[in-house]
Amino acid sequence: MELTRRGLFGSIAAPWLMQRRGVAAARPNIVLVLADDLAAWMTGCYGNREIRTPNIDRLADAGTRMAQSFVCTPICSPSRATLFTGRTPRQHGIHDFLTENPASDPPQGQAAPPPSFEREVMISDLLAGAGYRCGYVGKWHMGNDALPGHGFRFTATIRGRKYQDPDLNVNGGTVSEKGYLAEILTKYASAFIDEQGKNSPFFLTVAHLNPHTPYDGHPQRYYDMYRDVRFESFGIQPAAPNSLREREFLEDPVPNIRRCAASVTALDDQVAALQKKLLERGLFENTIFIFTSDNGFLLGRHGLWSKGHASNPINMFEEVMQVPMIWSWPGRIPVQAVRPELVNFYDFLPTLCEAAGVDPPKDRNLCGRSYLPLLMNRPLPRKHPWPDLVFGHFRYTEMARDKYYKLVVREPGTGPGELYDIRKDPRERVNLFDDPGYSTVRARLEKRLAEWREKYA
């Protein structure tokens, strides 16, 4: 289900005129679409020419795309926790994906969040306190999946991990559905939107499972789209000696990429369906629409398949750290715009707070900063420029990344250090960590990383 370019841009023209005439805008609605395992490089608007994402690309045309958006942790549960709390894994306490059966050699997974996580302040808590009606549909994966709480008055979360005939937790009760998961989640999200009026704001998260494994269970029409695609631009490499999670997909990568691509395009159609619902209800013009993903993915690059746990030791390659981050807000955020600044998931909560006119929590020691001025093309204070430095933390591995270089360090005995000149070596193939010619760069980034670690422990 697609929105035409003329129709989408036509819907944007009216609020621009209203803004120019000085009409005050109501507090915006917010719709956040969160994919699972979708890297920025896997979408058309970020340069991919073999995976079809026409609706995500149109969303980027209708708003502003952050060209360099990074997660703090390249695995689902801690990444989502950072997105919703603005805090790092050391602060919120979720360090790995949540599972009933953590692996111990090498360490993978975490049985449950710490008890302190229930006291974390999420963006939904803040918005609910400011009068927003909050709804959550899809994958939660941060503990208490049946009833997430945190200000969400309506929840329909996924039980298990299957794309056909899924089971859901709906406001704490169990519901068995028939059909395709992505379309069912859109149905629940649309029902939530149908209940909203124009005079009170809402915050809706739609967290899809796509394109996470398993790669079966999607409608056949999406598989048919990729029957003959070879993905020759991907740079697929043979399995690396240290490849770990989902290594089996590397035995015959192209057919598996075809199935993953089908899942991506199926997700893409749901973006258009959700926007169509907002248009039908007359809510589109005053709704911030955001699209992102909880972490990136490799699909054969570097001889690895999955995300941070694709290798032993943990990796922080660009493909797993960079995710799409697209904002559309008719009349407020410029269209067909791309921002080059480096932003991180821990910047999301301050940004959304500023957009909604809500104060961030003052006792949480947040390390992020609102990038709303960048999205709205407003000048920053001369004495407070954007830092263009982001950090990552995943268990024993940390990252400091600026516009030119990336440093990856690990706890002693867990793996080597890495340093890459991103300008000259965007695929991160030449490790400069021990190169004396880069000792000053390495020392500078190590110092900044140590400062970040100490300040936001």
Image (tube, helix red, strand yellow):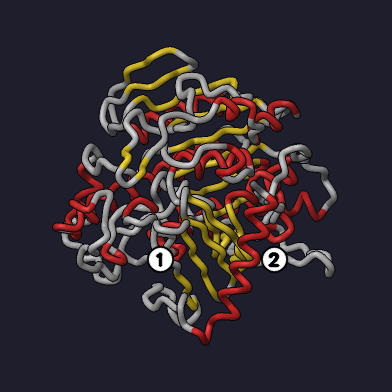
Task: Please name the residue shown 75% across and 53% down the image.
Answer: 17
Residue placed furthest toward the bottom: 437
Image quadrant where one finds the N terminus? top left
- Name the residue: 56% across, 25% down: 115
Which callout, 1 or 2, points to the residue nearer the camera? 1
Question: With 253 as the anchor, is 400 left or right in this view?
Answer: right
Amino acid of disc 1: Pro
Q: Residue at x 20, y 67 (%)?
A: 238
* In-front residue for pair 171/31: 171
Q: Is residue 330 above or below residue 134?
A: below
Foreground of the two, 37 or 170: 37
Q: Where's residue 197, x and y in %?
A: 66, 25
x and y percentages locating residue 360 in the rendered image: 75, 40
Query: Would residue 379 be seen by someone viewing this image from the given angle?
Result: yes
Name which residue type carries label 2: Pro
| N-term-proximal mark, 1 vs 2 | 2
Q: Position of residue 431 (x, y in %)?
A: 41, 76
Task: Measure the C-alpha gap from mark 1 to mark 2.
Answer: 27 Å
Which residue is the site of mark 1? 416
- Do the numbered discs 1 and 2 sit on residues whose CB atoms are within 8 Å? no
Question: Residue 4's mark?
Answer: none
- The location of residue 356, given as percent across then percent down, is 73, 40
* Residue that label 2 marks: 387
Whether residue 195 is situated above or below residue 402 in the rendered picture: above
Which quadrant of the view contains residue 86?
Answer: top right
Disc 1: CA contacts within 10 A as few (<14), some (14-19) or many (>=20): few
